């Protein structure tokens, strides 16, 4: 329980440091990404124990297209492989998959696979795993504002109602691994009053224990929302 009596409902993670993890070991970057997927698998398997309503993970940003073609296609291939290998287990464990970001810009085969996974888990009622794909907060807010304007007045409420995260609980805790302390265009709107947690741990080394530590730190935060 938090100091204000609440428990984290929605946690987001900027999964950073795959490249440095590989570099430290003189291994190819692709292997760092592969081990990063294993870290995702570990957390998703443990998700039930944390009783989170939603876990949002940053997998591919609107800026990650700037990486070399080879790395982008490695990441796409890993994503496809993860869905193929882990969808059954996630579906059986009650996980509901959600995508935030403009994933329709991906290759048609990837889009098809994603949409199959979304419908496969749509009726599940356990933890929502929201994966940010081709996600950028600027893009998300611009899309939401456009939709809000088409319906009438632009207000904080009407924009929030059109964000990709509109159906998720408010963001409580945002974690970034690898020692970087920036948001890199992730959940800028939703982060307005969330708690931030930075750790030096590189993403492939991140375990359920690290998440437990972050959640424990959250319980000691006092949230004020500008009041007193
Ligand atoms: C995070 O690891 C994974 C993605 C951005 C897809 P990086 O690839 O950014 O790893 P570093 O930051 O170079 O170590
Ligand atoms: C943020 O990490 C994006 C993801 C984790 C998917 P980056 O490694 O791309 O961010 P910068 O470039 O260091 O800000
Ligand atoms: Mg990085």
Image (cartoon, helix red, strand yellow):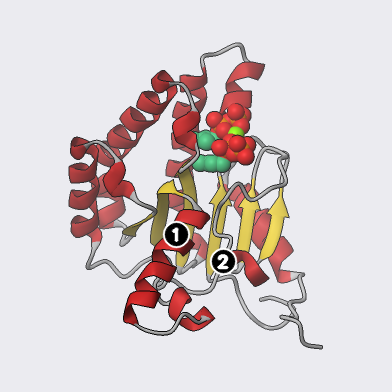
Q: Position of residue 45 (x, y in %)?
A: 42, 50
Residue 46 shown left or right of residue 205 in the figure: left
Q: Residue furthest right?
A: 228
Residue in front for this viewpoint, 168 or 143: 143
Residue 14 shown left or right of residue 5 in the figure: left
Quarter holding ligand 2: top right
Say whether residue 204 is visible: no
Q: Position of residue 223 (x, y in %)?
A: 73, 77
Residue carrying label 1: 140
Residue 206 shown left or right of residue 87 in the figure: right
Is 158 above or below relative to 137?
below
Residue 167 shown left or right of residue 174 in the figure: left
Q: Is mark 1 within 8 Å of ligand 2?
A: no
The alpha-carbon separation of the residues under discs 2 and 1 comes to 9 Å
Residue carrying label 2: 189
Q: Pointer 2 and pointer 1: residues touching (CB < 8 Å)?
A: yes
Is 178 above or below relative to 214?
above
Characterize the local packing of mark 2: few (<14), some (14-19) or many (20 or more) Cα atoms within 10 angstroms.
some
**Rendered residue at 60%/46% (across/down):** 184
Mark 2 vs 1, N-terminal side: 1
């Amino acid at each position: 329980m938090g100091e204000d009596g609440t428990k984290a409902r929605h946690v987001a993670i900027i999964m950073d440091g795959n490249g440095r993890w590989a570099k430290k070991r003189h291994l190819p970057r692709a292997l760092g990404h592969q081990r990063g997927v294993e870290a995702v698998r570990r957390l998703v398997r443990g998700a039930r124990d944390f009783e989170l309503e939603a876990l949002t993970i940053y997998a591919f940003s609107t800026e990650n297209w700037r990486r070399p073609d080879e790395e982008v296609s490695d990441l796409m291939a890993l994503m496809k492989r993860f869905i193929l290998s882990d969808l059954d287990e996630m579906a059986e464990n009650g996980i509901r998959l959600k995508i935030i970001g403009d994933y329709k810009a991906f290759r048609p085969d990837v889009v098809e696979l994603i949409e199959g996974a979304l419908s496969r888990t749509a009726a599940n009622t356990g933890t929502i795993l929201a994966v940010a794909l081709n996600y950028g907060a600027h893009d998300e807010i611009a899309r939401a504002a456009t939709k809000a304007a088409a319906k009438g007045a632009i207000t904080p409420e009407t924009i929030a109602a059109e964000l990709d995260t509109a159906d998720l609980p408010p963001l409580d805790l945002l974690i970034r691994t690898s020692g970087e302390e920036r948001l890199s265009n992730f959940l800028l709107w939703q982060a307005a009053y969330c708690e931030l947690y930075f750790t030096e741990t590189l993403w492939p080394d991140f375990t359920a224990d690290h998440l437990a530590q972050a959640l424990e730190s959250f319980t000691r935060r006092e949230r004020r929302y500008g009041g007193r």
